[in-house]
């Protein structure tokens, strides 16, 4: 984690150096300014006036540079962190979502990267804020030690108030969030039924029903505002009152002739600077957040990437074979799927169908044994050779890319035609160039894009894991015909008897073992086999 | 801007309260210079420490008043922005229902961002106005001649900032959008890690997200540059008056107490108010505008006319509808007389659901017309027709509320409907009509049964089943379809399985290029697609699948 923070400083670029220089210089100038202002007001000496002008101008320059360099270094560091983490996550693959939930991953690459990238800014600004804050206290101490003591006591009060606010506001916030969650849940239901509601013309009633909890939300919100106002009052009144005390005591010294008007003014300003210690402490908190954000990113970088071999794939028909394969939930001692043939994988849910598909496409590795493609164990193949050879389609495909064509991959047109997706893609607002976000698709349409993607990717072997489950009869028929005519080796996980009937052979799994392997017509005689397809649509 | 002004005007009492307490909140800005000058010149400096302490006391008192003012004005502010949030939230709900999809949790979050940024903008604006007024009055009270040294450079700095506001707003906006686009790409990629691995698309995915990360970093650096120039402009506006007063103030007759007082006015009142304004408008203001644009996007007025059609003949004449360049439905002519049972067959995505949308008036044809009993479909009273889409709607509430959603039915009527569509077992299993139900506790098939019974109970006699039975088994599907056919009126079934076509009186086959109307018996001779389907289709296989 600290290596990662050091990295953010390195990759923040020259801006980090500028930030450090501008901050230190600016802090010293800020400390000198009240004294110079006071002197100028007292003496009206042009030399002091020139000094004040110079200090103010330099201070302004430093502030400007610090604002720029703080933000720029953060931008550079955040981009570096995101590139690096993302690259690593892609290397780890789907295993990373088993360690960290998806939403959390998005947060880590988003907000957390931003926070961690702010580490250089927080460290430098926080450290340099100590100069005017502590300097202000020292300056006050030189005027009157009691004033400095009063100031420290005041700061303690502020911090305690802020802590008390944090405690009470979390419980209040929970009530608010619960009321909002009720609205969100009702909205999710109603949106799922949007077509029903639109057709029935009941949108107004539905809006009222979704917003039932609005009065509770208001009540909780107002309670939050009251708590905020209360804490704000207590915190806001402390610093000015300290300043008034200093002015009172300082005024008496002025009357006694121990202090000039300019010095009195400077003392009042030093109180404000001294109170800045509070915001310096705030930067320590920010640094703490940056550290914990960096720790969350470092945890991702500790995940192990999937190792790949280096072998290319020799020429061959695409024969897939399992050799003494064992993994939790599935045992396949010996299985050979001839190159160019199609095999349907059937079985009740939980029988190990998806696991078999994952092993065949090396989305997972077996605990023992080997899966080979044209004689080469999958884990010996280079990543490029492996992925060029195998195309994979899922029941619920996740589509990635800018546009529909992007999501399918190279050669999107022919692949989409084979998957029966071409007609509906061309009807989208911008055809194949439609951005994915603007192409709301039904489950069946997404499945066909996913199929097209598999067709575009695998040269020798297609693995379809229940990838036609949401298609209606007509579309499934068309896709089935296209699949039957395909020269590649096909492994098709399915719930439907029609799909199994079209395959050259059926692999029938039961409780993680192979129960049968042969033609559908031959297996159909077994009542247990027929039972696999009963109630499949429920 | 109009939206915001309207939000303030809707709460006139709170607005007056806010203005009143704001005066109290900025009291120290008015008092500080006069009090310091008085304390030094008339009090401590003149050998009258008592008078000096009184002036300091006045200053202290103004801070106490300010604290109370801050509390009350924050509550008044809340009284304006919370109703504003409710208006936005209701709008977001309406938009989501109209669009049929939620900007997920984003809608709630956007509404809260709008609320918080609106509070900030309103807060800094009134602080700025009242503070500037206070400082001007205070300066005039101290030594009016000094206004010449303070006001022009301050206005120049303000003008510089306002000039910089437009580019600043643009950069801030670009950054916000780039940030969201990165988050979208990351979410898409993280959600697709399995698929990316399966396709070996790691490089393309890294490039896809990487481009957005780089764009975002560029936007952040550009924003840093304009923010820095804003700091410079504000600094000039803040410091120039200070130096001018120090240089020329004494020459205009300012005593040391007055000089100290003026410095306090500028450095402790004017500069913080200006900085607050810059931060509030430049960051929160832009965020508010971006969020509001997003929230009020896509709102459309609700349908005006509601005509009850004299009969239920559905008629399409040259109806054409497209989402993009290629029409989904192209010059379709179709007449479905009242009382007919029509099945629509074709691959999904070919326009069957669009046909349902046209008939129910949810979509309006670009060319041609769609009428029900001679009335344009989008003006037909929703009570006259009922659409059951594939995704059945079930909301949190009792089973009874869900079933009687479209009608006021008696228990006997509900019993009959539940029995007719084959949902009696489900009702028993759930524990009767008063059982509480919610969507995610039911299977898709159970949800469809609830929706079917509800539609059966509705007074509508034009029924459109859009794959409404796809999660039921074939026998249950047949029972439901027969129930609606017996119930009377016009029935249009968008078929998920081919068996739906065999039961219907007539069949419309849509295969993209053409639409052929016929019967189950004559279609194989007229539609190659239908022939192909019917030829391969065996009741045995379909029953099993």
Image (cartoon, coloured by chain):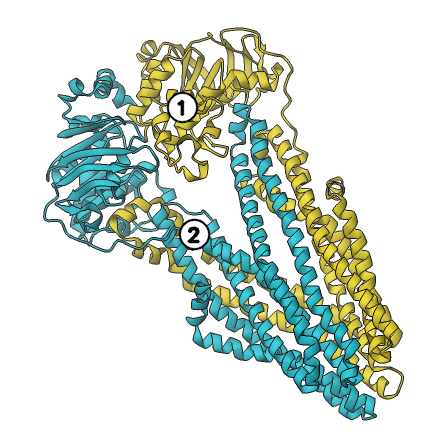
Are discs 2 and 1 both within one chain? yes
Tell me the colour chain A is drawn in.
yellow
Q: Is residue B405 above or below residue B357?
A: below
In this rendering, the count of numbered labels is: 2
Pointer 1 indicates a residue of which chain?
A
- Residue picked out by circle 2: A184
Residue B388: quarter of image = top left
Percent across and percent down for residue B202 are 58, 27
Visible residue check, residue A137: no
Q: Nearer the viewer, residue B277 or B110?
A: B277
Name the spot of residue B24 as percent of width and height, x first: 59, 80
**Which residue sits at x=72%, y=57%?**
A64
- Which chain identifier belongs to the cyan chain? B
Neighbor class of circle 1 (other Cα within 10 Å; few <14, some 14-19, many 20+) is many
Q: Residue at x 60, y 61 (%)?
A: B163
A245 to the left or right of B465? right
- Label 2: which secondary element: helix
Q: Identify the residue under disc 1.
A: A416
Rendered location of residue B456, percent (x, y)? 19, 44
A189 lies left or right of B539: right
The disc at residue B160 is none
Q: Position of residue A16 (x, y in %)?
A: 76, 47
The chain containing the residue under callout 2 comes to A
Q: Going by the image, does B362 lie left or right of B236?
A: left
Foreground of the two, A328 or B211: B211
Gap between marks 2 and 1, in whole Å? 37 Å
Left or right position of A63 against A430: right
- Is A270 situated above or below B285? below
Task: Please tell me whether mark 2 or mark 1 is closer to you in this view.
Answer: 1
Mark 2 or 1, nearer chain start? 2
Which quarter of the image is occupied by the N terminus of chain A?
top right
């Amino acid at each position: 984690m600290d290596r990662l923070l050091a990295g953010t400083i390195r990759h923040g670029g020259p801006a980090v150096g500028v930030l450090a220089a501008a901050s230190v210089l600016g802090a010293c100038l800020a400390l000198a300014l009240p004294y110079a202002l006071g002197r100028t007001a007292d003496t009206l000496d042009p030399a002091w006036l020139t000094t004040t002008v110079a200090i103010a101008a330099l201070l302004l320059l430093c502030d400007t540079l610090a604002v720029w360099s703080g933000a720029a270094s953060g931008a550079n560091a955040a981009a570096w962190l995101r590139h690096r983490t993302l690259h690593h996550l892609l290397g780890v693959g789907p295993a990373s979502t088993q360690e960290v939930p998806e939403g959390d991953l998005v947060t880590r690459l988003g907000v957390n990267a931003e926070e961690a990238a702010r580490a250089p800014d927080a460290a430098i600004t926080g450290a340099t804020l100590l100069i005017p804050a502590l300097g202000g206290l020292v300056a006050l101490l030189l005027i009157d030690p009691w004033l400095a003591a009063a100031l420290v006591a005041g700061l303690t009060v502020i911090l305690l108030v802020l802590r008390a606010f944090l405690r009470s506001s979390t419980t209040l916030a929970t009530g608010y969030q619960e009321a909002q969650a009720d609205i969100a849940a009702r909205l999710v239901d109603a949106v799922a039924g949007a077509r029903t509601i639109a057709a029935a013309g009941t949108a107004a009633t539905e809006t009222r029903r979704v917003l039932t909890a609005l009065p509770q939300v208001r009540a909780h919100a107002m309670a939050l505002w009251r708590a905020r106002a209360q804490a704000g009052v207590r915190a806001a009144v402390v610093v000015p009152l300290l300043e008034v005390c200093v002015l009172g005591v300082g005024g008496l010294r002025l009357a006694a002739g121990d202090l000039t008007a300019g010095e009195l003014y400077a003392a009042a300003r030093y109180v404000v600077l001294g109170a800045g210690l509070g915001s310096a402490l705030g930067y320590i908190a920010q640094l703490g957040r940056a550290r914990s954000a960096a720790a969350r990113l470092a945890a991702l970088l500790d995940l192990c990437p999937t190792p790949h071999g280096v072998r290319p794939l020799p020429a061959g028909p695409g024969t897939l074979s399992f050799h003494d394969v064992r993994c939790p939930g599935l045992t396949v001692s010996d299985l050979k799927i001839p190159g160019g043939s199609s095999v349907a994988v059937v079985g009740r849910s939980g029988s190990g169908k998806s696991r078999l598909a994952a092993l065949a496409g090396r989305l997972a590795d077996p605990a023992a044994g080997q899966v080979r493609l044209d004689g080469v164990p999958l884990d010996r193949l280079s990543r490029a050779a492996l992925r060029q050879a195998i195309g994979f389609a899922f029941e619920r495909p996740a589509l990635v890319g800018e546009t529909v064509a992007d999501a399918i991959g190279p050669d999107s047109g022919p692949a989409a035609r084979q998957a029966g997706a071409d007609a509906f893609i061309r009807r989208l607002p911008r055809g194949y160039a439609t951005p994915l976000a603007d192409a709301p698709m039904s489950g069946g349409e997404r499945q066909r894009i996913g199929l097209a993607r598999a067709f575009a990717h695998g040269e020798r072997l297609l693995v379809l894991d229940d990838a036609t489950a949401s298609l209606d009869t007509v579309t499934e028929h068309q896709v089935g015909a296209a699949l039957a005519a395909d020269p590649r080796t096909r492994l098709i996980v399915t719930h439907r008897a029609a799909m199994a009937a079209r395959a050259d052979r059926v692999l029938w799994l039961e409780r993680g073992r192979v129960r049968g392997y042969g033609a559908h017509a031959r297996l159909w005689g077994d009542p247990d086999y027929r039972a696999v397809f009963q109630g499949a649509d429920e | 801007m109009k939206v915001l002004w309207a939000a303030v005007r809707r709460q006139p009492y709170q607005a007056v309260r806010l203005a009143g307490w704001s005066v109290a909140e900025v009291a120290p800005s008015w008092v500080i210079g006069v009090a310091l000058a008085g304390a030094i010149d008339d009090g401590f400096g003149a050998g009258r420490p008592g008078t000096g302490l009184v002036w300091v006391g006045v200053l202290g008192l103004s801070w106490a008043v300010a604290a109370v003012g801050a509390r009350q004005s924050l509550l008044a502010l809340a009284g304006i922005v919370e109703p504003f949030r409710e208006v936005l939230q209701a709008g977001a709900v309406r938009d989501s229902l109209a669009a049929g999809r939620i900007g997920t949790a984003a809608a709630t979050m956007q509404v809260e961002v709008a609320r918080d940024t609106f509070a900030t903008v309103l807060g800094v604006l009134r602080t700025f106005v009242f503070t500037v007024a206070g400082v001007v009055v205070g300066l005039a009270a101290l030594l009016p001649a000094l206004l010449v040294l303070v006001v022009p450079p301050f206005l120049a700095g303000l003008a510089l900032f306002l000039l910089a506001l437009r580019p600043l707003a643009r950069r801030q906006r670009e950054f916000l959008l780039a940030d969201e686009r990165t988050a979208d790409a990351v979410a898409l990629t993280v959600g697709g890690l399995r698929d990316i691995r399966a396709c070996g698309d790691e490089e393309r995915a890294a490039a896809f997200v990487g481009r957005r990360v780089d764009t975002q970093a560029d936007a952040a650096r550009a924003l840093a540059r304009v923010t820095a120039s804003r700091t410079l402009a504000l600094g000039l506006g803040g410091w120039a008056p200070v130096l001018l007063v120090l240089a020329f103030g004494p020459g205009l007759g300012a005593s040391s107490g007055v000089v100290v007082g003026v410095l306090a006015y500028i450095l402790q009142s004017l500069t913080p108010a200006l900085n607050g304004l810059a931060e509030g408008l430049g960051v929160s203001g832009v965020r508010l505008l971006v969020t509001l644009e997003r929230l009020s996007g896509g709102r459309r007025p609700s349908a005006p006319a509601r005509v009850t059609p004299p009969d239920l003949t559905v008629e399409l004449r040259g109806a054409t509808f497209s989402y993009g360049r290629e029409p989904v439905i192209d010059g379709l002519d179709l007449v479905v007389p009242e009382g007919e049972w029509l099945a629509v067959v074709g691959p999904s995505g070919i326009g069957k659901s669009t046909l349902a949308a046209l008939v129910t008036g949810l979509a309006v044809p670009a060319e041609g017309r769609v009428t029900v009993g001679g009335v344009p479909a989008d003006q037909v009273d929703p009570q006259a027709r009922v659409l059951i889409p594939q995704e059945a709607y079930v909301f949190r509430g009792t089973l009874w509320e869900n079933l009687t959603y479209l009608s006021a039915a008696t228990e006997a009527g509900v019993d009959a409907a539940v029995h007719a569509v084959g949902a009696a077992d489900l009702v028993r299993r759930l524990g009767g009509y008063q059982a509480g139900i919610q969507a995610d506790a039911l299977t898709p098939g159970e949800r469809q049964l609830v929706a079917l019974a509800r539609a059966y109970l509705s007074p509508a006699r034009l029924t459109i089943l859009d794959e409404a039975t796809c999660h039921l088994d074939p026998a249950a599907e047949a029972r439901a379809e027969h129930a609606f056919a017996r119930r009377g009126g016009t029935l249009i079934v968008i078929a998920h399985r081919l068996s739906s076509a065999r039961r219907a009186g007539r069949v419309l086959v849509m295969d993209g290029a053409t639409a052929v109307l016929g019967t189950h018996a004559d279609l194989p001779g007229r539609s190659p697609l239908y022939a192909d389907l019917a030829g391969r289709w065996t009741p045995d296989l379909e029953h099993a699948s």
